[in-house]
């Protein structure tokens, strides 16, 4: 069964960075197709802006735009309503586009994947009942379809992180490490 | 460079004191030792900017993940904001695994 999910711009770039760095693109694509990616129209605008860059992220953004993503409109009133609830108008680096993703996910009652760690933390502290995950976890799940645990760990930290987050802070690096370690931990 | 032994021996006194505690927490000695070694290796490979901090945070968070430490135990070292962030991160990953199984 295909799972519908809402992705923010950062998650889509992470997903397509992983896909283009993958040595097994067929299997990668097969696993990716288990998810129907949904995003607000503003994400398409951000991806188009990213796509103008002459670097790896620009390349990954351009490639993502040729993939079938279901872009949908979000009412301005809904964005304004969530901005008031979250108290984030123009602060904490949380954009209208991030809030449009949240609004879409809540309206459709499907998970939101966001790789802006501060935004994920802020959103999930307000909407604890809703599933708000990191995009990097989705990558782990996709890789899990055809890689061992040690291969996933190595792929994330040797290939994906250096290419996706060029000058990553220690804080964000460790956040990713904690999330990936917990994802890969064996259940009792 | 010291040649690594294939079999790691640990002081028996340490084991006898630690074993009941780890058993109560359902954590194997192997898991604990391999976690510590992996944390050191990760800091050495990927966190050269501040290896000491990276080792400390990973170790504390891993003990939290195993159920040996609680949220309040993270506070004196990580501080309020980071302790909240890392516990939220662990909770998010656990919740994601549950969602995948649904």
Image: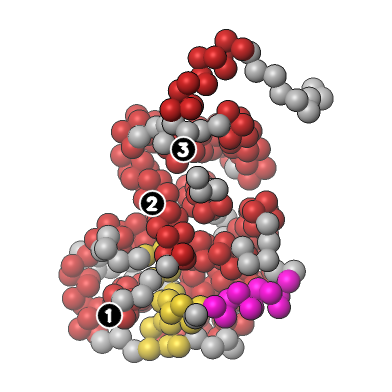
Residue under circle 3?
B66
Chain of the residue under label 1: A
Which residue has dot 1 on it?
A107
Label 2 to label 1: alpha-carbon separation:
23 Å
The answer to whether residue B61 shows anywhere in this view is no
Q: Tell me residue B80's x, y (percent).
A: 31, 39
Q: Please determine if labels 2 and 1 lie on a single subunit.
A: no
Q: Are marks 3 and 2 in contact (CB under 8 Å)?
A: no
Mark 2 — residue? B91
- Indicate the secondary structure of the residue bearing disc 1: helix
Residue at 38 percent of width and 71 percent of height: A111
Q: Percent from the top left, x then y, of residue A19?
A: 64, 73
Relative to the observer, which residue lies in front, A156 or A152? A152
Q: Are marks 1 and 3 on the same chain?
A: no
Q: Is residue B8 visible?
A: yes
Q: Is residue B42 left or right of residue A109?
A: right
Outermost residue, top side: B13
* Badge 3 or badge 2: first in the primary sequence: 3
Q: Main secondary structure of the magenta part?
A: helix
Q: Are marks 2 and 1 in contact (CB under 8 Å)?
A: no
Q: Which residues are magenta?
A: A24-34
Label 1: few (<14), some or many (≥20) within 10 Å?
Answer: few
Q: Chain of mark 2?
A: B
- Comparing labels 3 and 2, the label whose residue is closer to the camera: 3
The residue drawn where x is 31% and y is 81% is A108
State the image coordinates of residue B87 (x, y, percent, origin top left).
Answer: 38, 45
Residue A50 versus residue A83: which sits nearer the camera?
A83
Spatial distance from mark 1 to mark 3, Cα to Cα?
A: 36 Å
Question: Label 3 vs label 2: CA separation?
Answer: 13 Å
């Amino acid at each position: 069964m295909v799972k519908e999910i809402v992705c923010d711009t950062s998650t889509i770039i992470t997903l397509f960075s992983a896909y283009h760095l993958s040595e097994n693109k067929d299997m990668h694509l097969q696993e990716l197709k288990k998810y129907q990616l949904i995003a607000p129209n503003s994400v398409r605008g951000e991806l188009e802006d990213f796509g103008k860059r002459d670097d790896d992220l620009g390349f990954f953004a351009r490639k993502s735009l040729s993939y079938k993503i279901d872009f949908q409109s979000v009412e301005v009133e809904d964005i304004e309503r969530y901005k008031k609830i979250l108290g984030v108008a123009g602060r904490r680096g949380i954009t209208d586009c991030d809030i449009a993703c949240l609004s879409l996910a809540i309206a459709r009652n499907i998970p939101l994947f966001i790789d802006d760690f501060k935004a994920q933390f802020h959103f999930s502290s307000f909407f604890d009942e809703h599933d708000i995950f990191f995009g990097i976890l989705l990558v782990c799940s996709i890789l899990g379809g055809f890689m061992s645990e040690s291969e996933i760990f190595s792929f994330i930290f040797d290939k994906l992180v250096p290419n996706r987050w060029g000058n990553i802070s220690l804080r964000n690096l460790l956040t990713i490490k904690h999330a990936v370690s917990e994802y890969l931990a064996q259940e009792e | 460079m010291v040649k690594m032994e294939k079999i790691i021996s640990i002081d028996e006194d340490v084991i006898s004191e630690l074993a009941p505690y780890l058993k109560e927490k359902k954590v194997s000695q192997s898991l604990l030792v391999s976690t510590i070694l992996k944390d050191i290796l990760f800091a050495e490979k990927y966190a050269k900017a501040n290896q000491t901090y990276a080792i400390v945070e990973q170790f504390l968070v891993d003990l939290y993940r195993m159920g040996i430490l609680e949220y309040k135990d993270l506070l004196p070292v990580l501080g309020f904001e980071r302790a909240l962030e890392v516990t939220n991160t662990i909770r998010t990953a656990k919740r994601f695994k549950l969602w995948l199984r649904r």
